[in-house]
Amino acid sequence: MYFRESIIDILLEECLMYLRKSRSDDPTLTVEEVLRNHEKELDDWCEKNFNDKVPQENRYREVVSGEKMDERPELQKILGRLEDKKIKYIMCVEPTRLSRGYLDEIGKLIKLLRFNKITVITPSKIYNMEDEYDRELFERELKRGNEYLEYAKKTMYRGKLRKCADGEFIFVAPYGYINHQYKDGRRTVKTLLIDEEKAEVVRMIYKWYTIDNVSIRGIENRLDSLHIPSPGGGEWLNSGSVNIILSHPVYIGKIRFSYKRTTTEVIKQEFVKRYKRQDDYFLFDGLHDAIIDQELYDATQ
């Protein structure tokens, strides 16, 4: 292991610890378990090498994507503290916890660490960012993490698509249903069960709109006058919930996949992400029972 300073010169009060749950972590473990395991790994390493630990006030935890640094509030706090000359180190279980973003994100992070003279400490390697060789190794690790992230995204997408094609409902249950899962051999199947009380509200909404010709605003007022909580728990008026219910194919036993997707647009030379409806979505037959019959749904559309 090569680094410019001796390990005995490192003072843990000058070190910030960063803990982040990643997509690559064991999916059977909870967020708390993953972060606790990583924290223990770092604490054990510190006790073995320094007979001490990083102060609690210097520890930062979060559960977010590793792509964009400006979308991670705890990491932003750390980067802000780097300008304090008292801070000289960042500790994490591996470099990719700091970034798995595109090349511009990697370059920005390396510059911030290099010119603030910050050393990155991991249990397997200490990276002195003022050293060209260490910087190159650190950059290589971040690039490898980005490649894995892109691969993991594709794998997860294919897995979700396959489950939906098999009729499973893998999302949060919409109004009128509750999430349900059962065992089919060794496989856990995710689907929906009808919540009869709320399903009756769904049937009323379709009847009022399509048969009785009541406007969406009129339906919202009726539901609020009956003191029926909206899906969000508040009022129906102007919540958009009625419109969503009237257009969602889940109520005829279908599963809609990839209906809304994140797209990246270039606006004034800046990359802006938008969550937009798509026309080329998938529609599958679900394992769950329908609340509305096909004829009424078609008439509603």
Image (tube, rainbow, N blue to C red):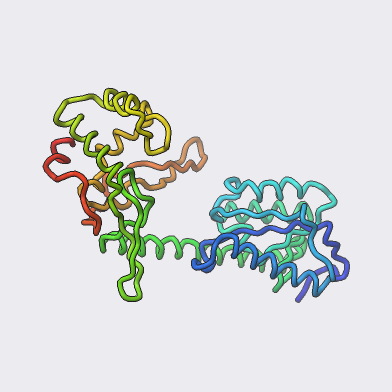
Q: Is residue 263 left or right of residue 217?
A: right
Indicate whether 15 appears above or below 227: below
Q: Which quadrant of the structure image shows residue 145?
A: bottom right
Residue 67 lies, in percent from the top left, at: 54, 54
Residue 299 in picture, x, y percent from top left: 13, 36
Q: Quadrant of residue 301?
A: top left
**Residue 218 seen from this side:** yes
71 above or below 170? Answer: above
**Residue 203, position in %: x, y?**
22, 38
Q: Residue at x 35, y 62 (%)?
A: 181
Q: Residue at x 60, y 60 (%)?
A: 32
Image quadrant containing the N terminus: bottom right
**In this image, 231 relative to 123: left or right?**
left
**What percent of the width, then of the height, locates residue 126?**
74, 69
In the rendered view, would you say 224 is above or below 19?
Answer: above
Which residue ends up furthest to the right in the rendered image? 9
Q: How many marks?
A: 0
Nearest to the observer: residue 186 or residue 197: 197
Does the image show residue 94?
Answer: no
Q: Is residue 166 left or right of residue 70?
A: left
Question: Which is more toward the observer, 210 or 198?
Answer: 198
Q: Of residues 54 and 32, which is closer to you in this image?
A: 32
The residue sitting at 64% across, 51% down in the picture is 108
> Residue drawn at (79%, 61%), measured in percent from left and top?
54
